[in-house]
Image (cartoon, coloured by chain):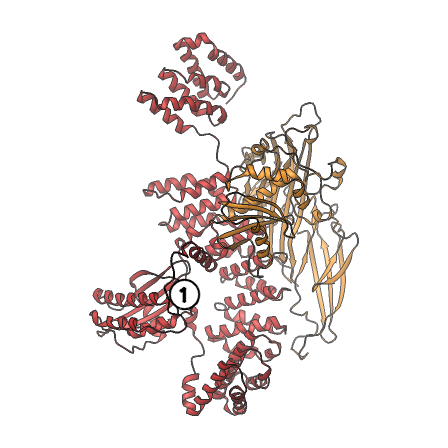
Chain colours: A orange, B red
Amino acid sequence: MISQFFILSSKGDPLIYKDFRGDSGGRDVAELFYRKLTGLPGDESPVVMHHEGRHFIHIRHSGLYLVVTTSENVSPFGLLELLSRLATLLGDYCGALGEGTISRNVAVVYELLDEVLDYGYVQTTSMEMLRNFIQTEAVVSKPFSLFDLSSVGLFGAETQQSKVAPSSAASRPILSSRSDQSQKNEVFLDVVERLSVLIASNGSLLKVDVQGEIRLKSFLPSGSEMRIGLTEEFCVGKSELRGYGPGIRVDEVSFHSSVNLDEFESHRIIRLQPPQGELTVMRYQLSDDLLSPLPFRLFPSVQWDRGSGRLQVYLKLRCDLPLKSLSQELSSPEQKAELAEGALRWDLPRVQGGSQLSGLFQMDVPRPPGPPSHGLSTSAPPLGLGPASLSFELPRHTCSGLQVRFLRLAFRPCGNANPHKWVRHLSHSDAYVIRI
Amino acid sequence: MPYLGSEDVVKELKKALCNPHIQADRLRYRNVIQRVIRYMTQGLDMSGVFMEMVKASATVDIVQKKLVYLYMCTYAPLKPDLALLAINTLCKDCSDPNPMVRGLALRSMCSLRMSKLDQWGQAEVLNFLLRYQPRSEEELFDILNLLDSFLKSGSPGVVMGATKLFLILAKKFPHVQTDVLVRVKGPLLAACSSESRELCFVALCHVRQILHSLPGHFSSHYKKFFCSYSEPHYIKLQKVEVLCELVNDENVQQVLEELRGYCTDVSADFAQAAIFAIGGIARTYTDQCVQILTELLGLRQEHITTVVVQTFRDLVWLCPQCTEAVCQALPGCEENIQDSEGKQALIWLLGVHGERIPNAPYVLEDFVENVKSETFPAVKMELLTALMRLFLSRPAECQDMLGRLLYYCIEEEKDMAVRDRGLFYYRLLLVGIDEVKRILCSPKSDPTLGLLEDPAERPVNSWASDFNTLVPVYGKSRWATISKCQGAERCGPELPKTPSFTASGPLIPEENKERVQELPDSGALMLVPNLQLTADYFEKTWLSLKVAHQQVLPWQGEFHPDTLQMALQVVNIQTIAMSRAGARPWKAYLSAQDDTGCLFLTELLLTSENSEMQISVKQNETRTETLNSFISVLETVIGTIEEIKS
C-alpha cells in the first residue's frame, strides 16, 4: 500500500515527510520526486511517475505537491481520492492550505496523518472520528474577525476571485472540541458552477458543459441535522417533467453518501447531518441543453491588410444577464488591453447585465516570409489567428438556474444566538471559447 | 411508526427489567422481555433498553436467550458500541456444552452487522473479492446483484473498483461486461471533466483503454474531449488521442474542425501532436484531412510545415488515392523546412513521386548545391536515393546534378555510410539502367500496411485485470519496461545471463540452421520451395477461410523480424507481410504450400501486454495430420528464434 507521504512547497522544499512502512528509500525520495518532476519531457504526464520500483502519485493543491509513493500496482482513482480528501482535511484543520499554514501546523499535520493512515492503509478520513484523536490546536496566522466577512470568498473553489480577494471566513480551521463553542455556529453553503462553452465562428453553439457542485462547510457541532431545499422545478434526466414551464434540467446528479433523499423526490429537499468541515453534498452536470441564455456573446470581426501587415480586430461583447446582476470585479480596477505571449488580452473590471461593450484593436503583424501573392484575398483573416476565450466570474448567478430555496437547521444552540447561515451562488468560466 | 407515548413504555419496561424481583422470577422476566419484543415488532423504538437486554442475555433459559438475541440483532446497527458488550456473552455461549446454545450464539454473532464500511473499506473489500472464483453461474449473478449499488457510489475509487470486479467476474458474459461499461460511462465522463487535473488524466487513460475494445463507446460524447486552453499539456495530448479514436461518420466534421484549431496553438509541441492526429484520421477520412493539411502549409510556419510533410509521406504510402492532392500541395514547402525529419520526408516524396511534381528536380538541385553544409547524414542518404529514382523518370533534368552529387559523396564526404551508399549507386549505374530500375523501382504504396498497423479490437478480457490500476496510466509499453526492470531487480543477481548472440545481424547460428533444416524430412509434410503468393491473393484467401488452429507460444522481449523471416524461408514458409521491429501489436502473415497443393496461411500476433505469441493457422483443405506437422514446424522455428535472442 502507501509507503510514504510527503508535502512539497511549490519550489520543492519538503514541508512534511512521513514513512509508513520503512520499505523504500529515505528522505531523499522527496528530492528525487522534485527532480523527476522538473526534468520530465513535455509530453509525459507527471501524475504518476516511476523510479526504481517505486511509483510516485501526486496532486497539486493550492501550490503544494501532495505526494504518495507505493511499490504496488494500486488503484489510481482511490489514491487520488485519498490525496484530495487529505487536502480537504488539512484545510479543515489548519485553515486555508498553503506553505505558511502547513509549516505553522506541522504538529497537527503529523497527528492527522498518524490517525488517517496506519502502516500505509487508510483507517478513516471522517471528521467525527478524527476529532476524538487530534489534540493539537491549529495555529492561525490572523485571528478571525467578523469584519472580514465583507470579502467572503469561496472556500475550496479556485476561482478568479479567490486569487484577488482571498476569503478568510470560510477558510479558517475547524476548532477542536475543547475550545470555546460560542463563536462557531456558522454554516456556509455554496452552489458553484463551472462553465465550458465553445462557439463556432458563425455564432452557433457547439458545446455547453456545466459542472455544478453544492459544497457545504459547517462549523456547527457534528450531527446537527439540516435540510436544504432546492428549486422545486429541478429535473434530473432528459424526460422528467416538474412544475410548469421549462424547469431547470440537469443530466446527472450524484450525492454524498451521507445524504438522506427521502424528501428529494417529492419536494426536492436534501436532508443531512454533516460532520464539521467541508463536504460536497451534491454534484451535477449538464451538457448541450442549456435552457437559460448564455451569459456572454462575443462578436469578433477581423480585417487583415496583407500588404501592410495591419491586423484589425473588432470585438463586440454583449452581456445577456438580467439588468440587475453585475459581473464580479476582476484583477484590474480599470479597463486595459495588452499584447503578450502571442495573445491579445483585454481586461474589463466589470460588466453590467444587459450592456454591450466594444473594442477596436490594431496591430502590426510582420508579414510572413515568402511571396505575398498566395491566393488569399487581402481582407481574409490569417489562418493562424487563434480563438478568443473569455474568463469571468458571475456572483449570485447559476447558469443552470439551480437555486437553494432554503437552508434550515434543526440544531438549537444552548442559549446562544441563532447560527449564521451563508448561502452563495456563483458561476465561473472553465473554458469559454469563441472561434474566430 | 414511533408514536407519542413510546417513551413512557420504554421507561416502564426499563424499570421492570432492572427490578431484581422480576429478574429472580424466570417467568415474569421472560414476560417482560416478550413485551419488549412485541413492541419492537409493532415498530416502537425499543433501543433504549439495549443495556438491560444485554444483561438479560446471560441466562440459562434458552427461550429467553433466543428472544434477547433476536432483539440484539435488530438494534445492534443502532448501538454498535453497546453491542460490543454482548460479544462477551456470545463468545461464552460458543463454548457451551449444549449444541443448541452454541448454534444460536454463532448464528447471532454472524447477523450482528455493526458499523458500515466507509468508502476506503469498500474499495479494499472490492479489491479483495477479485480473488474469489464463483462456483456456479447462479452464485456469480447473486454476487453481481448484491454489489450493484457500488456502481452508483459517489466515490470514484469505489465505482472503478466495482467496475473492475464486474468485468473480471463476468469474463464469460460479454454482454454483462458491455452493460457495466455503459453504466460506468457517466462517472468516467464526470471524472474527465473534473476540476482535479490528476483525476481527469487518470480517467482519460481509462477511457482510451475502453475505446480499444468498444470503439464507438464514447462517440456521442466527443465534445467532452475538446481541449481547453488552460489545461496542461499532458491532458491535451490524451484528449487528442481520445478524439482520434472515437471519430466516426457523424462527428468527423466537428472533430476535424476542433483539431484544426489546435494546429495553430502557441505550443509547437501541441500543434504538432494535433497535425499527427489529423494524419491518423486521414487513413479513414482522407480527402477532408488532406485538405486541412494543405491549408496548414499556407501558414508557412516551420514547425507546422515539417510535420505536415511527414504526415503526407506516411499517408501517400498507406492511401495512394491522395497522391495527386499531396503532389499539388508540395511546391513551396522546401522554404519552410529546416529539420532532418522534415527534409527526409520531403526528399522522399520528391524522389518517389517526382514525375508528378513539375519543379521536383529544381528543389532537389537546391539540396545538392547545399549538400556540403548539410549536417544530417540521413538527409544525404535520402537525397542520394531520391535523386537516383528521379533520374529514372526524368533523366535529362537530373543527370548533371546526380553526377555532381555522386562525385561529392564519393570524393569528399566524411560519413562512411553516405560514402558507401554513393559508391553503391555509382557501381549500380555502371551495371546498366535496367538493373537500376529493377532495384530502385519498388512499389510506391502499400495499403495493406494499414491493415497490419490497425490495432485490432481487443477483447475486454485482455485488459480487465489492468482496469483501475497504474497500467493504463503509464501506458502498456511503459508499464512493460517498468515491470521488466522490476523483475530484473528481483532476480537479477541469481540469474546470470547466458552469453547471448548479439542481435546485430540477422544470423542464424549453424547448429540451429541444421536443426531447422532437418525438420521437413522428419514429418510427412513437404513444403514446396519458392511459393510466390501475391499480397492481394493472400488477403482474399485469408478472409474467406476459417481459423483451423489457434495456439499461443511463450514469447519474451524484442527480436529481429529479419531473423524470423530468414528462418522461415529455410523451411519454405513465405513471409507475405510483417510489422516493423518493435511495433505493438506486432503482426506477420505467412504462407506455405505442401506438395499436394494444400495452402497454409498463418498469422502471428504479439500484443504488448502478453508475454506470448498468438498463432492462427488457416488451411484451404481440411487435413488434420498435415496441419499438425505444419504447426510443429512453425513451433520449432519460433522456438529456435526465441532461443537465439535469449
- Is A28 above or below relative to B364? above
Residue B542 percent coordinates (x, y): 33, 68
Q: The residue marked by circle 1 belongs to what chain? A: B
- Is B279 above or below relative to B494? below
Q: Residue furthest right?
A: A334
Residue A376, by quadrant, is bottom right
**Number of residues whose C-alpha sits closer than 10 Å to that of mark 1, classed few (under 14), some (14–19) or many (20 or more):** few
Q: Residue furthest top?
A: B21
Q: Badge 1 is on which residue?
A: B558
Q: Is residue B509 left or right of residue B89?
A: left
Q: Is residue A60 left or right of residue B1?
A: right
Residue A381 percent coordinates (x, y): 68, 69
Tell me the quarter of the image containing the C terminus of chain B. bottom left
Report the amino acid beneath label 1. Answer: Glu
Q: Is residue B215 visible?
A: no
In this rendered view, identify the residue nearer to me: B326 or B605. Answer: B605
Residue A153 percent coordinates (x, y): 70, 43
Q: Is residue A255 visible?
A: yes
In this rendered view, identify the residue nearer to me: B252 or B15. Answer: B15
Q: Count of labels shown?
A: 1
Residue B586, by quadrant, is bottom left
In this rendered view, identify the residue nearer to me: B258 or B105. Answer: B105
Q: Is residue B135 left or right of residue A202?
A: left
Residue A113 percent coordinates (x, y): 57, 40
Q: Residue furthest left?
A: B524
What secondary structure is found at the residue carrying circle 1? Answer: loop
In this rendered view, identify the residue nearer to me: A98 or B222. Answer: A98
